[in-house]
Amino acid sequence: MRAWCQVVGIQSGVMEQQGIPMGLAFASPAAAVKNLLAEKRDQPAPTVGTVLAEAWEPPLPKDKTRQSGLTVIQLTADSSLARAGVKVGDSILALNGREVSYRDDFLSGIEAAGVGARVRLLVEDRAGETRMVEVEVGTCRIPLRSGRKG
């Protein structure tokens, strides 16, 4: 906000847990947000149907100490990842041959591949066994709705 009370951007909040930042923070120009809301159309997002935690984030696997990779903490039942046999608690170590330790790296790789593409994931199960799975990048719709009716 400028000194004369003009809104120039919007920033999301960042949560902390025990002093460690959790979640994402975004700063967006107010004009871009206004245009996006004016269009009121759903935005497709590439996905393989999972929520992932980084190595430093809780909940950490109780049966091992992980230094890299991303732990599957939620999984959509009908996703390509679930159909490939990946389960909650498994870790994704690599995407298309590149090690992934950060959600941003994984999401960027999925987005770059694009909806309909097939990606290779190196997955480690809770017993420490690794295997390669190939999954199709799907899409989810992020609904954009205004608070007004009509």
Image: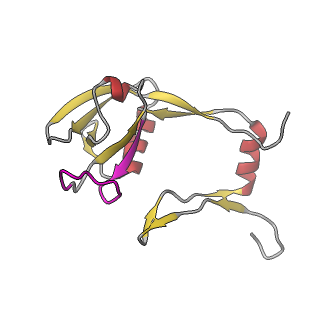
Q: Can you see residue 104?
A: yes
Give the total number of marks visible in the rendering.
Answer: 0
Task: Give the left or right position of residue 15, taking residue 145 as reference.
Answer: left
Q: Position of residue 11 (x, y in %)?
A: 63, 61
Where on the picture, by quarter, is residue 40? top right
Type of secondary structure dominating the magenta stretch: loop
Task: Give the left or right position of residue 101, taking residue 109 as reference.
Answer: left
Q: Is residue 78 above or below residue 30?
A: above
What's the residue at 18%, 32% (across, down)? Answer: 131
Where on the picture, by quarter, is residue 97? top left
Where on the picture, by quarter, is residue 5? bottom right
Q: Position of residue 24 (x, y in %)?
A: 51, 57
Q: Is residue 41 above or below residue 94?
A: above
Q: Is residue 146 above or below residue 54?
A: above
Tell whether position 57 is magenta. yes
What's the residue at 25%, 51% (across, down)? Answer: 61
Q: Position of residue 105 (x, y in %)?
A: 37, 48
Viewport quadrant of the C terminus: top right
Task: Give the left or right position of residue 58, taking residue 3 as reference.
Answer: left
Residue extending farthest front: 62
Give the magenta range. Answer: 50-65
Viewport quadrant of the N terminus: bottom right
The answer to which of 61 and 31 lies nearer the viewer is 61
Residue extending farthest bottom: 3
Q: Can you see residue 118?
A: no
Task: Give the left or right position of residue 107, taking residue 149 as reference.
Answer: left
What's the residue at 71%, 50% (across, down)? Answer: 33
Tell whether position 67 is magenta. no
The answer to which of 118 and 61 lies nearer the viewer is 61
Q: Position of residue 102 (x, y in %)?
A: 35, 52
Colour convention: secondary structure
